[in-house]
Every structure is written in C-alpha cells, then in structure tokens.
Image: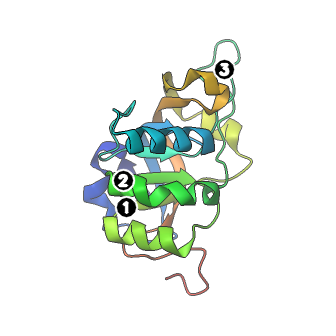
C-alpha cells in the first residue's frame, strides 16, 4: 500500500492508478455543499479564501462533535457528486486532492485529468473508523454552518482507494478508464 502526503501530492499523483489503495496523511479541509457554495461566492467576489486552494486536499465530510476525550466524532464521507458543480472551478484554483465516495461526472473526471489532480474514495459507513486517523482538528471557516463548517483535519494513514487518477483512469467506469 502506498503512502501519500497531502503536501507532496502533486509530485506523487502521476504515479498513482485508479483502484490503487493508499494511506493519506497531512491536512485535509472538510467541506460539503454549503461550504463549497460559500467558497465559490468568495471567489466570485474576489475575496480572500479561508485557506489556500493551491495544493490543498478537500474531504467531503461534515464531522460530528467530538465525544469527551476524543479529537473528533464520526467523520465519514458524503456523496461526491453533490460537489461536482463546484469542482472544476476549485481545480482551476489549484485544488490537488478530493476525498469522498461514489462516482464523479465526466466533466469532473476530465478536469481532474487536465489539472493532474486526484480523487480518492473513502468507504461510506466507516466514519468511526476514519475518525481514528484524525490526530488534530481546528475550525477554519463558516462556524455558523455547524457540522458543515470548514475544518482542518490532521490525518495519519487514512485508508483510501484512488477513484480517479491524473490520467483519467476511473474505477467507476466500465473499463476502468
């Protein structure tokens, strides 16, 4: 199983293939529908973003509050297709990695290929297991969104599978391409 660091992802992306298992470590920013909408609004207004998209990794998740003595509650993936309408724009701004569950549309797969990015898949229903890989969490933006606010998670060896690789290989297509 390959290890991948979020900060060095662009260098490693090209050598990864759809279907390959990886262990991801580094900073992941959580963002679901409402946060994506806000980020696009900030971009449209020419305003500063709460985090730098260049080389960033976004995890489509809305973590639950942490039980006593834990860093985070459950933090499973949400359906990635709900973010498809925002993804090309974020890739154009330098987004490097997306983590979620389920297939992406053809436009997003083409944009991932065009920008040399990576889409990684997490197992749905495994939010408690994924939470064990979170070493630290801090809120970054949009606290009024509650669980859907943007948080920076420090991950260690999060188990994932390459869903769409930088060459357009796609585990959800019939032929894997």
Decide: is 51 above or below 68: below
**Mark 1 or 3 closer to N-term?**
3
Q: Which residue is mark 3?
A: 66
As helix, strand or loop, the secondary structure at mark 2 comes to: loop
**Residue at 61% across, 45% down:** 33
Residue 117 is tagged as: 1
**Residue at 56% across, 60% down:** 84
Q: Could you tell me how far apart the alpha carbons at marks 2 and 1 are, in whole angstroms?
A: 5 Å
**Residue at 35% across, 43% down:** 53
- One can see residue 15 in this view: no
Tags 2 and 1 in contact by the CB under 8 Å rule? yes
Q: How is the image coloured?
A: rainbow
Q: From the viewer's side, name the closer residue of 10 and 151.
A: 151
Q: Which residue is mark 2?
A: 96
- One can see residue 20 in this view: yes
**Residue at 63% across, 18% down:** 70
**Mark 2 or 3 closer to N-term?**
3
At which x and y percent is residue 89? 41, 56
- Judge left or right: residue 52 versus residue 157: left
């Amino acid at each position: 199983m390959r290890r991948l660091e979020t900060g060095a992802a662009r260098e490693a992306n090209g050598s990864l293939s759809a279907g390959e298992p990886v262990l991801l470590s580094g900073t992941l920013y959580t963002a679901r529908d409402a946060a994506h909408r806000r980020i696009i609004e900030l971009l449209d207004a020419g305003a500063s973003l709460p985090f730098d998209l260049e080389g960033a990794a976004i995890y489509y998740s809305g973590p639950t509050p942490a039980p006593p003595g834990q860093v985070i509650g459950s933090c499973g993936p949400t359906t990635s297709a709900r973010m498809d309408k925002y993804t090309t724009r974020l890739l154009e701004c330098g987004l490097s990695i997306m983590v979620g569950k389920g297939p992406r549309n053809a436009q997003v797969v083409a944009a991932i290929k065009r920008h040399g990015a990576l889409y990684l898949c997490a197992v749905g229903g495994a939010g408690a297991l994924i939470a064990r890989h979170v070493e630290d969490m801090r809120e970054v933006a949009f606290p009024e969104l509650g669980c859907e606010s943007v948080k920076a998670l420090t991950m260690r060896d999060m188990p994932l599978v390459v869903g769409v690789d930088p060459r357009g290989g796609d585990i959800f297509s019939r032929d894997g391409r």
